[in-house]
Amino acid sequence: MVQMMIRHLATRPGTMRAIAAASVLGAIFGVSGVARAEDAPTGDPANGKRLYLADGCFECHGRAGQGGTFNYATPALAQIALPVDSFIAFLREAPNDMPSFSSTVLSDKDAADIHAFLQSLPGPRPAKDIPLLNQ
Amino acid sequence: MSKRSNAGQDKTGHDGTPDAGRRNFLKGATIASAAALSAPVAANTAVSGFPEQRPKAAVKAALPGPKLAAADAMPPPADPVNQTSSGGDFMVDVLKTLDIDYLAMNCASSFRGLHEALINHGGNSKPEIITCPHEEIAVHVGQGYAKMEGKPMAMICHGVVGLQHASMAMYNAWCDRVPVIVMGGNIMEANKRAPGAEWPHSAIDPAALTRDFVKWDDQPVSLQHFAESAVRAYKIATTPPMAPVMLSLDAELQENPIENRDGLRIPKLTKAIPPQGDDAALAELAGMLVAAENPVIICDRMARTQAGMPRLVELAETLQCAVIDNFGRMNFPSRHPLNQSFRRSILSQADVILAMEVNELWGTLSDFHDRIARSSQPRYKKTAKIVTLGTRGLYMKANYQDLGRYQEVDLDIAGDAEASLPVLIEQVKRRIDESRKSAIEARGKKLAAAKLATIEQAKSDATIGWDATPITTARLCAELYNQIKDEDWSLVGTSIRLSWPHRLWNFDKPHQWNGVAGGGGVGYTLPASLGAALANKRHGRLTVAIGGDGDFMFVPSTLWTAAHHRIPLLYIVHNNRAYHQEYMYLQAMAARHGRGITDADIGTTIKDPFVDYATIAKGFGVYGEGPINDPNDLGPALKRAVAVVKSGQPALLDVVMDQR
């Protein structure tokens, strides 16, 4: 999933500019521009779940963060590995057909809460443990 | 031209003699009426709404009462009241020569003549009437049937208004390049139209409404003209590129006596041999494919008959090259090691791309971005050679834009891909020498390994949200496959860009898939699935379909046809309680404007109230179960529904789903 997100990021010059800007700011403030997830402020997953459903994220990515289908496959987000800062930067200037969500409609705090919710979702489990997937 | 124009003047039978049958008819009617008056009250007809079947012998046994006897003594009317033949009878004879199994319709006065003839002259067999509650359903039934059975059905609709109902489905069939023999009633002569509905239901040129999306149309003015046009219509519709055709049938032509049956002749149908690609061009293509390091085949509506898939497999295996299926037909086995349909990134490495019967090649070869400023990039490298093989471009229309953007190619071979494959395969085999064999074999091994990884990835992806409520699409598809995998199954519809069956299931038979709507017109999946199920019924296949709830809402009465004709079909309503594609589009619009991102459900969702699809099914006489919310309830419910379908009846399951 991270590779997919980064691939999306890489295809969008504006997004890359945003990440580059974040990196510069990070350098100024002595943190990595693309923060590791464990360094990010902890979001509120309960509020994140509420927002994920209310703001329509589930429409493309599924209530369980399993991904889905729009005019093409939409990525799974459960157990998101993208750091929160990069996630917020991605939302602000999203590539391809992904809608961009400005701070007017989605604050950084709310975006961080959504990120926390996505991190809390169970990711894939071994398919061999599910007989229906092995026939 | 018409007998109605001579009403009041022509008092002769079809053979020119006074119509002796008329007096006998009056006598028969009188006796029958008397019998009805004197007979005991029929059992419970008021409750059932239908009369009991009358024993035909009873008509002769009864005696007329005094009033009726007096009526019989009245002078005969000046115009004929009885006839011993009708143009409709001849039309039925013509349809029988075309080996048309079914005719779908919603009854209407403008084709009452043909309708009666189908039953009483044709014996309601070849074609058998399939009663549909809506003309859009009737055409879609024909579309689904033709793709599964490999031959067209007929349908007939009411003048003007029925055709207007039918038109969207005709457009879907046109975009899908599927033959349907569409007929419509009309009253051509203005002085014959009754006051009232016959005027707004008549037209000078009824087919004008649909001319942009039929391959050919006609309005015969004589029975001989009808015979020739019906045979011509069949031939044109079934010659690649296939498409619907339209015949407008004058009511007088259907209803009035045949003036000279011996003078009418039904022409022989000789089907056109599908056009094959030029031999030299196919040889050039073969050379390109053999020399290529990474050839990729893209197919869409390639497999036209049961021979299509094995031929494509033979070509791909000979070349050990990647195949990308756009799923317009059952082209290529889903688990074949060379099936790379879910690894489209390989297009960027292709040096030769062969597109066979691809509907929209530019869209397949481009990444398109639906942003404020729309943009696109090709998915292939500049040096790649692109070759098309197909009939898509052999018959085009101007107005409706089901064309796709113009795609530059290096070699464009006009010809039916399936028909051209044997020559292409032979040419490829002839060109593969020892120096290429090892490279080709190595390529195949790499692709096979990648395919295995793709399958494993699909399984892993399917586990996310496995136990979630609402149920995930992956879970539904896995549960359904578990119930049908040991049957001779046929998945005949998904209207929701549903990729999970092709990611998880083993499609390896030509009848296991038949594509999608074509024009994207909503309301396709349920009736077209029923049409495919009608075709599958005679082959004893287990037919299943997964359709969206929004799609279902356009044509729910299709279920009545399923029940009435006892067509076995397991229909699963993928009930995500939304017009989900539009829901996502609206969300993107709101986000683009930075406003109201919590309100995209307005006008896009199906809630308050939720729809109880199982109850709807029961109302139409179909087994229904649901709403099913718990994924653990799915398996048992599917098992029960499959048992119903295997008993010869339709069944519906309402499954409350997450998006898709």
Image (cartoon, rainbow, N blue to C red):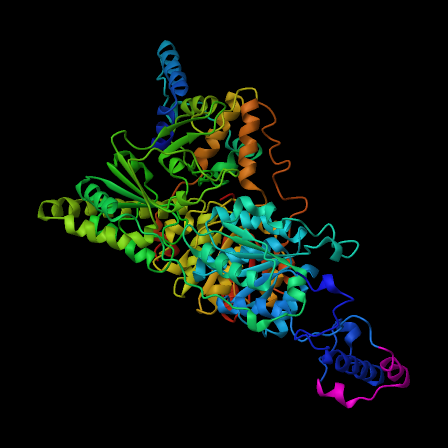
In the rendered image, is residue B68 in sight?
yes
**In front of the other: B260 or B563:** B260
Residue A60 x/y as whole percent: 49, 37
Would you identify the image quadrant in which residue A34 lies? top left
Image quadrant in which you'd find residue B479: bottom left
Q: Is residue B162 left or right of residue B67?
A: left
Give x and y (percent) for residue B142.
52, 58
The residue sitting at 32% across, 56% down in the picture is: B309
Residue A95: x and y in percent read 42, 26
Question: Camera-side residue: B281 or B565?
Answer: B281
Query: Residue B2 in the image: x percent, y percent?
Result: 68, 62
User: Which quadrant is home to the N terminus of chain B?
Assistant: bottom right
Please tell me which residue is depicted at 66% across the width and 73% down the height of the picture.
Answer: B14
Query: Can you see residue B333?
Result: no
Query: Would you place residue B156 above or below residue B496 in this image?
Result: below
Q: Residue furthest left?
A: B434
The residue sitting at 56% across, 37% down in the picture is B582
Q: Is residue B644 left or right of residue B34?
A: left
For the record, the magenta segment spans B56-75
Magenta residue check for B69: yes
Q: B361 above or below B146?
A: above
Q: Residue at x 38, y 45 (%)?
A: B326
Horizontally, residue B280 falls left or right of residue B524, namely: left
Q: Main secondary structure of the magenta part?
A: helix
The relative height of residue A29 versus residue B295 in the rendered view (above or below) is above
